Amino acid sequence: MDKLLIEGGARLSGEVAMSGAKNAALPILCASLLCAEPMRFSNVPQLNDVSTMLRLIAQMGVTVTPGGEDGLILDSQGLDNPTAPYDLVKTMRASILVLGPLLARCGEAKVSLPGGCAIGARPVDQHIKGLQAMGAQIRVENGYIHATAARLKGARIVTDMVTVTGTENLMMAAVLADGETVIENAAREPEVVDLANCLIAMGARIKGAGSDNIMIQGVERLHGASHSIMPDRIETGTYLCAAAVTGGQVRLTNTSALYVDSVLQKLREAGCQVSAERDAIELVAPARLKAVSIRTSPYPAFPTDMQAQFMAINCVAEGTAVIRETIFENRFMHAVELIRLGADIKIEANNALVTGVAHLDGATVMATDLRASASLVIAGLIAQGETLIERIYHLDRGYERIEQKLTSLGAKVSRVR
């Protein structure tokens, strides 16, 4: 099993391009199930989660063909097996995103209940309730969701909570439903908008994506289209934090400040100078950051996927910060590993009190989930001596070529196989 070895103390400097967004690519790849014509995608990140999704839809009968350096062509004309088996679904919760499009296109779907990062309960009941409101017959047995519907009917759906994958699943199901569907309390994330833009290019009729009220007028069929995946805003935020904690100066390209406004505000509050161009962000960090308190909330507020990274930079910042996690109840597992490096962190319920220390010391630590992995990388970059991060398969799920990108910025990072 691969590990990541980091020799701390290097100041990050230079320019690096960000990859396409994992959290946009996964639902958009599932959207290819909705039509029988080829879909052409570009800016697709090369990640383990993307590879898992491609294997999942390929076993359904979808033909997957490379289309350039970061491109793919997906053709689901031969779709004949609307099943998502446990052995492919267990490693990735986003696999649930095949449920809506399979049901809309095939009239049936058998999808294993998903797995993924151990960061807390992420129930799929909102997906099921929404599809049932659209007329689907659903039963859950033997670890599988069995769904059938001759044709889904438009409906008014009010989700009990803001759910990104739930919004995406129901939106994909609704584009082929009979009549109008309204999703209230919808997720507003940019990845939802990117999916909507892809569906619109395929012939869907969608209004309101990016707001909490999305309206979809169902159509008889969709057609093939081309779509470029949006930049990864969480990767962007992670590299900005890495540069900030090392007192560095970096320019990130193929990204946009529009998607990371709340993160940039906190980095400025920490003492960084941040400037934005149309498709690039530049950051200049001070010698030592100031501690910044954060509270995670659904977009456009501060993202839960950046909580761990800011905990890492607060570990060596001047002062004390309070981090409040409101999305997932089990997302402070990285704190124990940061404490192994010498951090001063106290956890009480969903609050973490982080007091900056003069320095961290390298040690062997273990990644517990995707974003926790990123926090340990950031801490390793500033820690004295060597830090060895185990179980980095979590990193490979969401960060494309992370050791090469960090090395290009001057970090001393290597993969130990």
Image: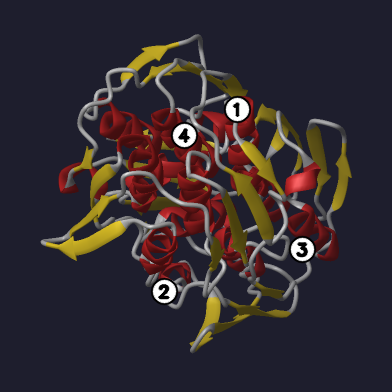
**Residue matched to label 1:** 203
Badges 1 and 4: C-beta atoms under 8 Å apart?
A: no
Kind of residue at badge 4: Ala
Badges 3 and 1: C-beta atoms under 8 Å apart?
A: no
Residue name at image x 30 percent, y 41 percent: 107
Circle nearer the viewer, 4 or 2: 4
Q: Quadrant of residue 278?
A: top right
**Residue matched to label 4:** 31
Q: How is the image coloured?
A: secondary structure
Q: CA–CA distance between discs 1 and 4? A: 12 Å
Q: CA–CA distance between discs 3 and 1? A: 48 Å
Q: CA–CA distance between discs 4 and 3? A: 42 Å
**Left or right of 285 in this view: 86:** left
**Residue matched to label 3:** 289
Instruction: Give the SS element for disc 1.
Output: loop
**Of callouts 3 and 1, which one flags the residue occurring earlier in the amino acid sequence?**
1
214 or 229, which is in the foreground?
214
Q: Residues within 10 Å of mark 4 (few under 14, many from 20)?
A: many
Instruction: Give the SS element for disc 3.
Output: loop
On the image, the x and y values in percent for residue 73 come to 44, 15
Circle nearer the viewer, 1 or 2: 1
Residue name at image x 79 percent, y 33 percent: 280
Q: CA–CA distance between discs 1 and 2? A: 49 Å
**Residue matched to label 2:** 336
On-image quarter of the C terminus: top left
Q: Quadrant of residue 314?
A: bottom right
Vertical relation: 70 (above or below) 273: above
Kind of residue at badge 2: Val
